[in-house]
Image (spheres, coloured by chain):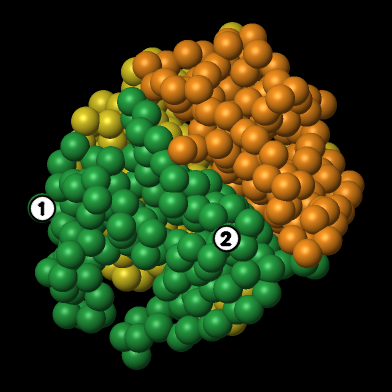
Chain colours: A yellow, B orange, C green
């Protein structure tokens, strides 16, 4: 992971073999971010994505092992009980140009991932919502 | 709708049963936003989306009643003759991980929707473009 | 192309017949942007999209000639050896509400394209990565 700090954003570049979610959590910890919004594009060759089933309160997951364009990567960084949580949704482009996507658990960069991370000035936190057994943003 | 105001953004959280477009219009009015850019992710269980047919100058619409991940939600807030207009395009993830989307008329939050709303410092306005019978951004 | 400059962003509106990538390169040159992040939505009626094959170090391309919603347009502006490079990924919505997408080579606006361009305060540069024969972000 390489990055520069701009007046507004961290401009982040991930390289082949790097993990998307783990790298952004490293950035959060290393730079002591209070919270952040995340936006990116690039390419990966492995991804685990999820679809949340509200009634069953769990994610269906799908593991992909193929070259994929990261057509959109959007989400946030906030803090739960156990440290930083990177919450990302992703749209992935396949070689036939169809798109597939959902919640992003983790992905491995194949070529590059270019990410803009905008720190928040206020701390963003998550707390357990027992209806869904998910940690949702805590905003009063 | 809960939100906090950050140095740059409103960080907005919508809860189950809340309407996406109507809530963001409430935010615009309540906070007297001059205009805004909107970006978000989350999950909905109802959505009405559109595809604009330029020759017929009307939207094809499709109503969805199922659990859907909001993979990307992007757009703007600007003012037309009748008050705030929230113009959003959306990519929605289905339980088979396929994506569907287009113009967003309205959607109902199922689990949560996390939205970053960046106010503009200048007023954003829309005006009727008679070629399409649509209110497009008014920029000179 | 019409635009206004806000405290944070250029708010850009492209009109029917205008080229997306070429217009944003014009903006970069005309406004002497050091670099930028780009986000947009709208509609096009022609697009050339790509899928990068890492092993073959080349893009598969697909040319589309139909009305398409631009559901998401995300990327950056940075400088290579030959001037500004606009690197965009796009998700396009078809009349059956399915989505298609990937790397965007170029597209022609049909109705409107609304783009937020956030200039960076530091110069963004690209350099050749010989592993892929691509110009990737240069961040040390």
Against C132, is C29 above or below? above
| Residue B86 position in % (x across, y down) | 66, 32
Q: How many marks?
A: 2
The disc label shown at residue A66, or none:
none
| Residue C113 position in % (x across, y down) | 54, 52
Against A57, is A136 above or below? above
- The answer as to whether the residues below labels 2 and 1 share one chain is yes
Question: Which label sits in the foreground, 2 or 1?
Answer: 2
Residue occupied by mark 2: C16
| Residue A5 position in % (x across, y down) | 19, 37
Q: Quadrant of residue B107?
A: top right
Front one among A92 and C7: C7
Front one among B100 and C115: C115
How busy is the neighbourhood of tag 2: few (under 14 within 10 Å), some, or many (20 plus)? some
Residue C83 is left or right of residue C109, and the answer is left
Q: Residue furthest bottom?
A: C56
Front one among A26 and B31: B31
Q: CA distance from mark 2 to mark 1?
A: 40 Å
Front one among B45 and B76: B76
Give the residue drawn at x 28%, y 36%: A9
Residue occupied by mark 1: C140
Give the residue drawn at x 42%, y 16%: B6
Q: Chain of mark 2?
A: C
Mark 2 lies on a secondary structure that is: loop
| Residue C115 position in % (x across, y down) | 47, 46
How busy is the neighbourhood of tag 1: few (under 14 within 10 Å), some, or many (20 plus)? few
Q: Are marks 2 and 1 in contact (CB under 8 Å)?
A: no
Residue A45 is left or right of residue A25, and the answer is right
Mark 1 lies on a secondary structure that is: loop
């Amino acid at each position: 992971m390489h990055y520069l700090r701009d007046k507004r954003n961290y401009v982040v570049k991930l390289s082949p073999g790097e993990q998307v979610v783990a790298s952004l959590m490293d950035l959060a910890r290393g730079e002591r971010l209070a919270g952040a919004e995340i936006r990116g594009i690039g390419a990966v060759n492995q991804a685990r994505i999820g679809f949340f089933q509200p009634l069953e309160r769990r994610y269906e997951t799908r593991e992909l092992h193929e070259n994929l364009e990261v057509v959109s990567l959007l989400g946030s960084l906030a803090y739960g009980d156990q440290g930083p949580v990177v919450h990302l949704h992703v749209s992935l482009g396949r070689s036939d140009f169809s798109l597939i996507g959902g919640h992003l658990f983790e992905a491995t960069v194949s070529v590059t991932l270019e990410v803009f991370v905008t720190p928040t000035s206020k701390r963003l936190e998550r707390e357990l919502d027992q209806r869904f057994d998910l940690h949702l943003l805590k905003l009063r």
